[in-house]
Structures are given as structure tokens and as C-alpha cells.
Amino acid sequence: MFKKYISAILPLSLVLVVWSCGDDSPTGPDLSEAPDAPTLENVEMDFSVFEHADNFSSFQMKDHEDFHKTLQSIQEDSEFTPYEQAAMFASMAQLWFHSMGQLPNAWFQEHQWGEPEVDGDTWIWEWSFSAEGESLTMTVTAETVGDERHWELRYTTEGSENDLDNALLIASQVRLDGSGGSWQLYDFFEDEPVFVVDYELDGELTTMVEMQYDEEEDGHFLYERDGDISTLQLWDVINSASTSIQWNNDTGTGSIQSAGYRDGEEVCWNEQFEETAC
């Protein structure tokens, strides 16, 4: 599913790069009264407790194909300690989230939007450009609905192999008080989103992230933090295994219980990240 999505958006990404490097971007009036573009940059799961594990940073360096191959080999012969195994799953969740989050941050480029129009309570930015025989129209809308601001990013293309007609790429619903929101990413040709992310914030602290990253396999994870205690649950990864991890952000201790690790038994680690009795 991820490869299919990337294949669909790659041509538009190339056109976007050509456009953003030019000097033909529309200009408009002061947008100080317009809503700020939404972002996921302030949403960050705290996996710092796992940074002592060598495999945490090494997994972050892999692309999705190599990452999948690595997971298969781990399933067959794993010598990871409980702490290292938990770090691997935390790395998986962070990789998926960052891969998804880069797309809204890349395409919601407010400085390129130019002058908006206002239709009732809805702000509308629409502009077109062309490059190498292809034309593309982008439309961004922002509408206040109750205590949320609803955003949509849509594309219309002409001259490409598979033209798009007002296709929805990204939608988000962000609470006006900054306490959370939801994002959906689409692959243009399907009604259901490819990725879905819901999050909660307590000030600058991310307290919840729930992400669906593979609808066909029901792959998703849930990260939660309550004070010093954090949990990470993952479903349908590594041959449909389910995993539950809990750790103390202050002491560094924690536990993991995974259907694909140690026969599904709960195993724990201490302050030195060494295996210990639960």
C-alpha cells in the first residue's frame, strides 16, 4: 500500500519541485488574518528512553523496503534483549509516523499560496502552474467548524498519464485550542485514506498518537503517555503479531509482551536496560 501511494504522488512531487524553484509564484496581500497552515511538527512521541539501544538509530536509517526485510530476519532468529526488542518496535512507530508527517509539512507551504479568497467562513487558496507539458491546479481550503478548523488540499492535473479531477490528497481537523487533531492522507484514486493519524497534546507534550498505516492489513499503533509512564501498542506487524510495551520515562525501566517475541511472555528490563524479573 505504501509503495502504491508513493508511486502515485511521485510525479506531482517532481512538478512541485520545479514550480517551487521558479519565480512565478503568485503574490498577494498580507495574510495575517488568514489561519496558519496546519502542521505535524509539534507532534513528537518521546522515545528518548530507547536512544541507548544501538538498533534504535540503525533502524531509523533504513528505507521501507530494507526495513521490511530486516523485520523478517528478526522474526526468524532474534537475539535481542527485551530492551532492544522494545527499541525496535519504537523505531518502527517513529519511522512510520515521520514518513507520513513529512508529506503534510512538505505540501502545506503557506508562503507559496498567494492571495486567498473568502467564501463565508471558508478561506480558499487556488493557483495553477505548468512544467514539462503538465499543468496542475492546487486548492487549499480552511473552514472553522465548531471548535475545530478543517483543512483540505486537492489537486487537478492535465497532461499526465493519470489526470486528477479535484482529487483529495490531505485532510485535517485541528482543534483551535491546540490540544489535538486528526490527519488523513489519500492516494487520489481511493475513497478511503491511506494513513490516518489522531493526536492529543498537553502543552508541548504529546500524550497520544494513534496511527493507521496499512488499511488492508489493519496495521496500526497507539502511543500514550500519562506522566512518567508511556505505552506503545502495535497490531498486525511481523506476521500479524501484536505487541504491548510499557516504560518509565524517569527510571528507564520497562516491559514488553509480543506475540512474536519470547513466545508471547512478558519480559522486563531494569534501570541499566538489562533483563530482569517482572
Image (cartoon, rainbow, N blue to C red):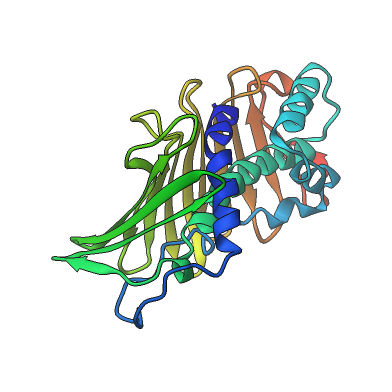
**Which x, y percent locates residue 206?**
50, 59
**Where's the N terminus, which quadrant?**
top right
Q: Between residues 134 and 218, which one lies in front from this camera angle?
A: 134
Q: Quadrant of residue 180?
A: bottom left
**Does residue 37 appear to the left or right of 51 in the view shown?**
left
Residue 215: x and y in percent read 46, 26
Is 93 in front, or is 9?
Answer: 9
In this rendering, the answer to whether 22 lies above or below 5 is: below
Determine if residue 81 is in view. Answer: yes
Residue at image x 75%, y 45%? Answer: 60
Left or right of 21 in this view: 173? left
Which residue corresponds to the image point at 68% horizontal and 21% vertical from the top-left?
260
* Observer-nearest of 172 and 54: 172
Q: Residue at x 37, y 63 (%)?
A: 179
Residue 226 visible in the snapshot: no
Quadrant (top left/top right/bottom left/bottom right) for the C terminus:
top right
Q: Quadrant of residue 90?
A: top right
